[in-house]
Image (spheres, rainbow, N blue to C red):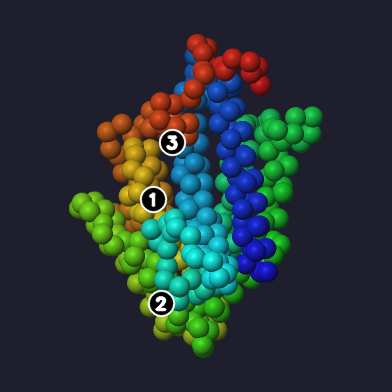
Amino acid sequence: MLNITRVHTTVSSMGYLGRGIGVAKAYALVREAGVGKGHRLPLYKHPLHMRTLANLTCDYHGLMLLTFYTLYLLGLDEHRALSSPCPLLLHPLTPPKDKVSPLLRTLSSLHKSFICHTTVPLTFSCMESLGGVGYLVNSESEHLNLSRLFRDACVGAIWEGTTDVLAGDTVRALKHADVGKEGVGALGWLVETGLAGLEGKGEKEQGKRIRKVWEELKRKLEKGKQEELLPEARGLTHRLAEVFIAVLWMVDARIRPGREVEGMKRRWMAKHRFGPSGDGQEEAKVEGDGLELDLAIVYGEGGPKGVVIGGSVPGISKL
């Protein structure tokens, strides 16, 4: 039951964020902003605004990877009790049967603690991207009411286990006298399997950086006593979540390659301290890494569809 309520809350938080990004994307097509000396641009042509939306999209995609991998594990765990044959395995990180329960035990707490906490400031950024319209309680236009969505999104980090409660539960699960080692071993399987078979110098170097962070966290978990780790549980749990998202990014980019996916992965890795410098400030610059790529990340390859001269979409009034 706890697994169900946790993933339900996480999916709800992701729904709030997804809706916020959807509204922000639509708003950028119909709103103009001044860029100096009487010159105005539609927001979707404004480089800074689109970089902000692109970065939001990168974070959203990474959180979705962890959310639905946890849901996949939940489905595998429930299916074990059925007598019917196992269905076609849908994910390259499908674990052996003996690792399903240990992975789910850890990720059910970890993913809820990290994702529901992280979606709150991201949902705020969606509201902020609309300016004053986003802040208003827009009850007459509920489809634009991001202030309500932001308020509701905050509860995800509170009920069904607060951020700290579930971070502490994650540490307890991994330090449990009977099953803690199984949990750490299952997480190690996830990292090593996800990073296996990397090709090319760039991918291999990226894999080494992710593996290095994992090994440091693993040593801390194995050597530290539970009472010593508990005060650091939030930071420890959330860094573990970032490691697993990084692994899932590597797998995702490998099974569905594309310019925007690769660009999102590169930016996410840099932001979350998996880039070459590891300081979270670096953003790798490559040819074409500008407004065109931002538009592809936010709206898909080719940019927004249905936009006419002047920056608006037919049938939608400017707000």
At which x and y percent is residue 95? 42, 68
Residue 244, labelled with which disc? Answer: none
Task: Answer whether residue 291 is visible to the viewer in this image.
Answer: no
Residue 185, labelled with which disc? Answer: 2
Query: Dot 3 lies on which element?
Result: helix
Q: Is residue 311 left or right of residue 281?
A: right
Q: Amino acid at mark 1?
A: Asp
| Residue 184, picture quadrant | bottom left
Which mark sits nearer the N-terminus, 1 or 2? 2
For the point 53% across and 84% down, which residue is it?
176
Q: Is residue 19 left or right of residue 286?
A: right
Q: In the rendered view, tell whether residue 37 sits above or below residue 28.
A: above
Write down the residue under mark 3. 297
Which mark sits nearer the N-terminus, 3 or 2? 2
At which x and y percent is residue 108? 57, 66
Query: Dot 1 lies on which element?
Result: helix
Per the model, the C-alpha gap separating discs 1 and 2 is: 23 Å
Q: Quadrant of the N terminus?
A: bottom right
Q: Residues within 10 Å of mark 1 (few under 14, many from 20)?
A: some
| Residue 29, picture quadrant | top right
Residue 252, labelled with which disc? Answer: 1
